Image (cartoon, rainbow, N blue to C red):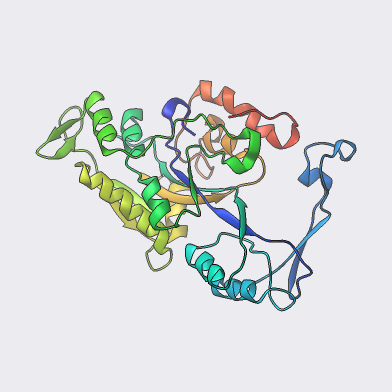
């Protein structure tokens, strides 16, 4: 969400590989769905088909999921419940499978702690937004099965999504121009604060490479871009995911962190992530966002799941 440039929406949405649901065999997780859960309108105003029950086979490891897809029913599966990797797509293509995909309600972000200088400066955050090489990340790590988005309301959420948000494209030149205009100084190749003091160390929490190599690589690429223009104070701090999310959300002890979110059909997250009433420890607004004007704009999103009206946010 780039409103008031309060938060850099540096995200990449995943694609969910889907095929037709057949009568799959195996161990099933059964989840009944009521019309109140699935539809915002009463049953009498229902538009489109209704799903009473969703069933899918529980397959625990990615390798086993790929094997099930190659087998197909009745012994395997023909629906992939989750994100798929480029190597999986290549394996399926080699077996001459026809693949279809749709946009998924999922995004990843670098979150900023706006309580800590210089991240409390919107201009500094704006400069960092231009140092995330989104196209390179998507091309090299995901082989273009993901797309870049510029808002935490992905296109999969339909008319709620706003296609006119500034994409903040990758540009070292633009990042340096923003820093210069905001009063920062480059001395002997290193950026300094407006008062010529050193920029404080900015910790970037990312998962351990052995646990989540793709997320680790994304964090490393971001830090390398910062170093390339003279922001060497941006430093990676790999650690256990649960440890750093506890530090971020429960203790506010962070500067920048990497996290991915799986969303629902509606953009209710905007209220809980960015509204000032949620600016307390243990909430999702660990960023420290507190703008009354923004609060008024976010209020409609808190009831998005119960109103048939939709408009871009």
Query: Farthest residue in the top direction?
Result: 293
Q: Give the residue at the far right of this rendering.
A: 44
Residue situated in front as seen by the camera: 27 or 19:
19
The residue lying toward the viewer, choosing from 236 and 26, is 26
Q: Is residue 156 visible?
A: yes
Visible residue check, residue 206 = no
Q: Is residue 254 above or below residue 160?
A: below
Q: How far across and down, in percent of the image, does residue 199 sit?
A: 22, 38
Which residue is at the front of the view, 305 or 117? 305
- For the C terminus, the image quarter is top right
Toward the front, the furthest residue is 96
- Give the percent coordinates (x, y) of residue 6: 43, 30
Identity of the residue drawn at 35% across and 34% down: 125
* Above or below, comparing residue 290 to residue 132 in the picture: above
151 relative to 209 in the view: left or right: right
Q: Please give the name of the residue rendered at 53% of the width and 65% of the height, measured from the top-left corner.
A: 89
Q: Residue 227's x, y, as percent?
A: 22, 47
Image quadrant in which you'd find residue 181: top left
| Residue at 55% in and 25% down | 295
> Residue 111: x, y in percent?
42, 43
């Amino acid at each position: 969400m780039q409103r008031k440039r309060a938060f850099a929406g540096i995200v990449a949405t995943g694609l969910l590989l889907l095929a037709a649901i057949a009568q799959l065999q195996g161990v099933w997780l059964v989840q009944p769905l009521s019309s109140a859960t699935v539809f915002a309108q009463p049953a009498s105003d229902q538009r489109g088909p209704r799903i009473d029950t969703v069933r899918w086979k529980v397959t625990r490891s990615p390798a086993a999921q790929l094997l099930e897809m190659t087998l197909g029913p009745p012994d395997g599966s023909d629906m992939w419940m989750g994100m798929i990797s480029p190597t999986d797509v290549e394996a399926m293509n080699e077996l001459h499978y026809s693949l279809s995909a749709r946009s998924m309600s999922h995004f990843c972000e670098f979150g900023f702690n706006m309580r800590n200088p210089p991240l409390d400066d919107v201009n500094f955050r704006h400069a960092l937004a231009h140092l995330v090489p989104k196209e390179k990340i998507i091309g090299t790590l995901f082989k273009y099965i993901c797309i870049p988005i510029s808002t935490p309301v992905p296109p999969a959420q339909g008319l709620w999504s706003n296609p006119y948000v500034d994409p903040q494209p990758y540009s070292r030149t633009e990042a340096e121009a923003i820093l210069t205009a905001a009063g920062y100084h480059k001395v002997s190749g290193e950026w300094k604060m407006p008062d010529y003091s050193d920029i404080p160390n900015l910790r970037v929490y990312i998962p351990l490479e052995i646990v989540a190599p793709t997320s680790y690589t994304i964090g490393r690429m971001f830090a390398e871009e910062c170093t390339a223009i003279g922001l060497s104070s941006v430093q990676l701090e790999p650690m256990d995911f649960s440890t750093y999310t506890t530090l971020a959300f429960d203790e506010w002890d962070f500067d920048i962190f990497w996290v991915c979110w799986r969303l629902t059909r509606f953009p209710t997250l905007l209220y809980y992530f960015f509204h000032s009433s949620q600016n307390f420890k243990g909430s999702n607004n660990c960023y420290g966002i507190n703008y009354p004007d923004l609060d008024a704009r976010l209020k409609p999103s808190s009831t998005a799941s119960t109103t048939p009206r939709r408009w871009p946010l």
